[in-house]
Amino acid sequence: MDFKGKIKAVLDGHGGVLEDLSRKDLTLHAIEHKEAMVAECGALATWTPPDSTGRSPKDTMIVRRDGGASANIDWDAPNNIPLDPETFEMLWQDALEVLSAKQRVYVTHRVIGADPAYALPVTTVTDRALTAAFTVNMFRDVPADIARSIYAEKGFTLFALPYDKIRSEKYKGRLRDVDGRPSDMAIVMDFDNRVGLVYGSAYCGSCKKLMFTVMNYMLPDDGILPLHCSANEGSEGDCALLLGLSGTGKTTLSADPRRALLGDDEHGWNDTGVANFENGCYAKLINLRRDKEPEIWEATFRKADPTEHGAIIENCMIYPNGRFDVDDDRLTPNSRVSYPLTSLSNIKADPVSGHPRTILFLAADANGVLPPVARLDRPQAMLWFLMGYTSKLAGTETGITTPRSTFSRFFGAPFMPRHPDHYAELLGKKMAEHGTDVYLVNTGWSGGPYGVGQRMDINLTRAIVDAALSGKLADVDYEEDPLFHLAIPKSCPGVPPELLSPRNTWPDGKAFDERARALAADFAQHFDKAYGNKGLDEAIVRACPGK
């Protein structure tokens, strides 16, 4: 099927196509057609159906064919769910019929990527003004020199029908079964035809994450490493990357008044340096505090005219006076806000930088056995990149009574569809080429596990980050931890030396040893299960704790 040709034919014959409206006009359309209401602060507020308050991983699929892009996909990974081409053609055709009956169709032309050398043109077609406004927030303006992009002629089409549900029984056995009926939503990527479909998912993040998964698939073929990370730049132009899963402090630590922010979520690293993918931020709102996250708070709740505000607030509890309660999670703990980067004060206007001098891997170890900071050599960095470790805490999910080890490769497993060595080898190659230092920073617990020890003081963590980014950790003496194979500094400016060795902070050394061995066993077990048959470099295998 000619997917792009089919959608073009529908648009050509449709009398209500609205193309590249301004953010102001899209805002007015969203208000007029009751897609959103205006909050007291002036931001747009919207609420999605209960099944669309977050991503739906079980309904997120990749078209699988013989040969082509499918050869690059790690089909053993649980997040890479295959969909046969025939079913995708059926979905696309059904979606086109739904689109043709709409009164209004919104089309936006944007790009993913701030570096014009590999900016990916993306055309979004949707029946919702709010979805179009979201793409204006999150995707970038088309640069004047887009013709020099390696993807200039390989643009991607995103087709989004967020509120139209799949109803036909003909998908039984083709889509996920839900209580005896086929699922009524599908989020599908077809890498070969460069098209994506969001059908029935009103969560704005479905559009964002689909497109960034596309970038994470495409870039390695051209020697560009995609990274799920935040990035900032010092006054001397020194670039730093911070990678970490939710709850590790990535957003907090990257927001440094002395360093300009490039972005907080997705970046690419090519032969000239680092560039942000995005035009905006998509931040969690639950339990947001003005004193801890002043930039996010101001971007979200500053008072402005709705046509100038720019923020889209999704699934946050609101009162009749138009004010939000960010602590109320009855709708969802995943309330979100989308806003353009220009809503922040300390940003780099052109979010590109040189090669990163320093990379930080953040782990909130609730076991309390990882050191506050450790230096990683090249194989170790590749290993910890593969593992993407942090802890889930007791009480965060039903049935979790003690900290549980969590591994999400590359700190963003659902969005990294290729074989793991495609990403890990690129990291190792770029580290070697550009002399990048990599450190593991534990933002979790010290002196005992969660419930016994204490969370690392944010001021001490900031001192560690400062020392790493300034190069002050490059010349200190280190000692090796024999179990985790980590190089632990004997000193760090601003940090008491006795805190640097985690065993010293525990009142019971034997209890520490037992807990450390248990965590190392978690690493070894996960590594064997996920990568035991992947033929990884032996140096990476030896770097694994417990090996």
Image (cartoon, grey):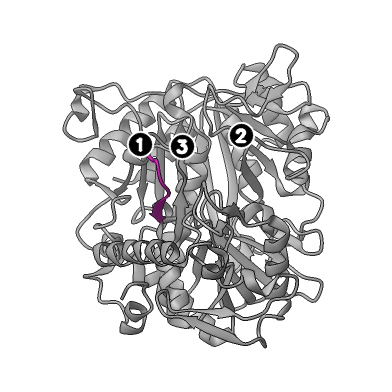
Q: Kindly identify which residue carries mark 3.
A: 395
Q: Is residue 47 above or below residue 134?
A: above
The residue closer to the viewer here, 84 or 414, is 414
Label 2 element class: loop
Q: Kindly identify which residue carries mark 2.
A: 286
Q: Is residue 418 left or right of residue 466?
A: left
Q: Kindly identify which residue carries mark 1.
A: 399
Residue type (three-letter) at the residue carrying disc 2: Ile
Q: Earlier in the sequence, mark 2 or mark 1?
A: 2
Percent position (x, y) of residue 539? Answer: 35, 84
Q: Is residue 284 left or right of residue 294?
A: left
Is 401 a magenta residue? yes
Q: Rounded to the nearest whole Å, what is the CA distance between mark 2 and mark 3?
A: 16 Å
Label 1 element class: loop
Residue at point 37% right, 63% down?
Answer: 514
Question: Does the residue at mark 2 contact the one at mark 3 (Cβ under 8 Å)?
Answer: no
**Image quadrant containing the C terminus:** bottom left
Q: Is residue 444 visible?
A: yes
**Disc 3 crowd, CA 10 A, few/some/many (<14, 14-19, 20+):** few
Q: Is residue 273 visible?
A: no
Of tags 2 and 3, the one toward the viewer is: 3
Percent position (x, y) of residue 436? Answer: 59, 81
